[in-house]
Image (cartoon, rainbow, N blue to C red):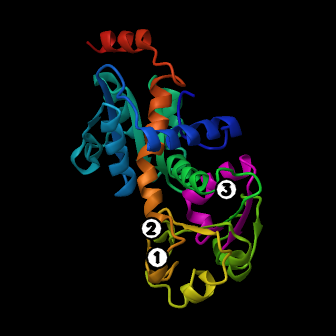
Amino acid sequence: MEHFVTMKEKSAAEILQLVKRANEISQKGVNPLKGQIFAANLFFEPSTRTKTSFVVAERKLGIEPLEFMADHSSVTKGESIYDTAKTFEAIGANLIVVRHQEENIANQLAESLSIPVINAGDGTGEHPTQCLLDLVTIYQEYQKFKGLKVVIAGDIKHSRVARSNAIALSTLGCEVYLTGKEEWHDDSLAFSYVSMDEAIEIADVMMLLRIQHERHQQRTSMQQEGYLEKYGLTVEREAKMKKHAIILHPAPVNRGVEIDTNLVECERSRIFKQMKNGVVARMAVMETLLTKGGNFNEEDFNKRQAFIG
């Protein structure tokens, strides 16, 4: 694995290897990587969980995060994202983590750079590391994927999380269902749509999504009057879920919109466990990329360091 930018090209074996490695790290920890390694975290969109968990994951692996703030960079002078990434590569970054509002930007960088690229979210494209931490959370709960019924609920059309998860979960043998407002359906995803009332009865995993206000052509009301009752997870709906079913949400959570505030930290909620798993999931990805699947190529690393000076 050279890059981690999409779930589309990942086999079940590749995905499961990362899931199991992340789970192993959560249980046993990990030895820091050898050598002086730098990661450039190029975040062009606001982020709390993703950016912070990458920084924590990097430091636990012995990787030094390189500071980048788009508003205080040469991007404000007209520099392209490619030139920004190329600059970090030239001055010593061994890894690029990128979040950007433009779909497919991570793929473009991966094709152009000689160092690993990780997609931390690209527009309405994909969010593969969020997907991986969701998979780790599900695996820790059920120790399997095949046959599990997973419902992804909410703003499907504008959600990169929905896309990555639907692809990966299906690859792993889950039965994937979608639910949400009809105008937010995504016909490019070949999965069945059900109503929210049907969804709560079939789901082993209920994966809620926030409304992606920033990606709508016309900004919708933050409160979305009546949305919770029609499309969200109410206390009444939660009571009808399977006894063992769990609730996931990539966050940030809009309490009282997609989920009743009393359910955010209820017994079946794994929302904050997902956040915790974000660190180990990203550690597993970076470790795998930098060690070329488990065996860190010191010769290749030393050559790159020598070239940098």
Query: Toward the viewer: 254 or 184?
Result: 254
Specify few, some or many for label 1: CA neighbours under 10 Å numbering under 14, 14-19, or 20 or more. Answer: few
According to the picture, the residue beneath numbered tag 1 turns out to be 219
Rendered image: mark on residue 166 = 3
Answer whether labels 1 and 2 touch (C-beta < 8 Å): yes
Is residue 173 rendered magenta in the image? yes
Placement of the N terminus among the 4 image quadrants? top right
* Residue 242 percent coordinates (x, y): 68, 74
Amino acid on which the number 1 mark rests in the picture: Arg
Residue 90 falls in which quadrant of the image?
A: top left
Q: Marks 1/2: CA distance?
A: 7 Å
Specify few, some or many for label 3: CA neighbours under 10 Å numbering under 14, 14-19, or 20 or more. Answer: many
Q: Marks 3/2: CA distance?
A: 22 Å
Which tag is nearer the camera, tag 3 or tag 2? Answer: 3
According to the picture, the residue beneath numbered tag 2 turns out to be 214
Q: Secondary structure at mark 3?
A: helix
Answer whether labels 1 and 3 touch (C-beta < 8 Å): no
Amino acid on which the number 3 mark rests in the picture: Ala
Residue 182 falls in which quadrant of the image?
A: bottom right
Left or right: 256, with 206 as reference point: left
